[in-house]
Amino acid sequence: QVQLQQWGAGLLKPSETLSLTCAVYGGSFSGYYWSWIRQPPGKGLEWIGEINHSGSTNYNPSLKSRVTISVDTSKNQFSLKLSSVTAADTAVYYCARGVPDYDFWSGYFLDWFDPWGQGTLVTVSS
Amino acid sequence: SSELTQDPAVSVALGQTVRITCQGDSLRSYYASWYQQKPGQAPVLVIYGKNNRPSGIPDRFSGSSSGNTASLTITGAQAEDEADYYCNSRDSSGNHHVVFGGGTKLTVL
């Protein structure tokens, strides 16, 4: 059973860099997309970006200029850095495993996030 | 298009059937996945693909898709099903960016 455990600083000042790491336990690192997703208080889910085992990344265009996602396959870990944070970046941040697939019968693509990390509340305040 | 649209809130009487919908152009080529989120908890996958349930998800949860609309159906809703539900897929623009619906708050009366 794959489990994700995440950690990082929970309180930042404006203009600082958010840094979170997610460790993957109990499963293969390859063949999946390793994602970061956030949720501002009382709001919905927002995808931040993803990385695969070879280091290829894909970022939300709205955050791309400030986001770096990296991977350390030797430790089965991936990390998020978000620079120049403001109060608008206050959110619970989740790491998650993205599973891609294709249904040949229907011709539909599919992917899903499972499992998720426990979440880290990051508050940006002066 | 990169948007998935969900009704903000839906209610259902205990034991009745409820359908939560998700609309978006990307759903013509992507199956939606569905997540249940209870207060203070991380989202949990409940449906993925055409109509697949992860281990441990009750069979009262089912999924379907038609055109640009995906649906999550709960047949015989229980009190513990009260939660926020989110759909997701990737956009159909070719960039393969992940998109989430805005979420539906399900109240079980």
Image: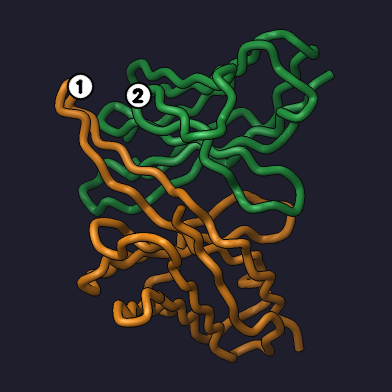
Tell me residue A27's x, y (percent). 36, 60
Camera-side residue of A85 and B14 = B14
Residue at screen point 49% across, 73% down: A22
Q: How many marks?
A: 2
Rendering coords of residue A114 (x, y %): 46, 49
Q: Residue at x 64, y 84 (%)?
A: A9
For the residues labelled 1 and 2, say whether their Cβ atoms are less than 8 Å apart. yes
Chain A's shade in the image? Answer: orange
**Residue B58 horizontal side relative to residue A74, left or right:** right
- Per the image, label 1 sits on a secondary structure element best described as loop
Q: Position of residue A68 (x, y in %)?
A: 38, 79
| Distance in Å between CA atoms under marks 1 and 2 | 9 Å
Residue linked to disc 2? B50
The kind of residue on which mark 1 rests is Ser
Q: Where's the C terminus of chain A, which quadrant?
A: bottom right
> What colour scheme governs how the chains and residues are painted in the rendered image of this protein?
by chain
Q: Label 1: how many residues lie within 10 Å, few (<14), some (14-19) or many (20+)?
A: few
User: x, y percentage for residue B92?
Assistant: 27, 41
> Is the residue marked by circle 2 packed among few (<14), some (14-19), or many (20+) residues within 10 Å?
many
Q: Which residue is mark 1?
A: A106
Chain of the residue displaying label 2: B
The three-letter code of the residue at mark 2 reads Lys
Instruction: Give SS at disc 2.
Output: loop
Q: Chain B colour?
A: green
Q: Residue at x 61, y 18 (%)?
A: B74
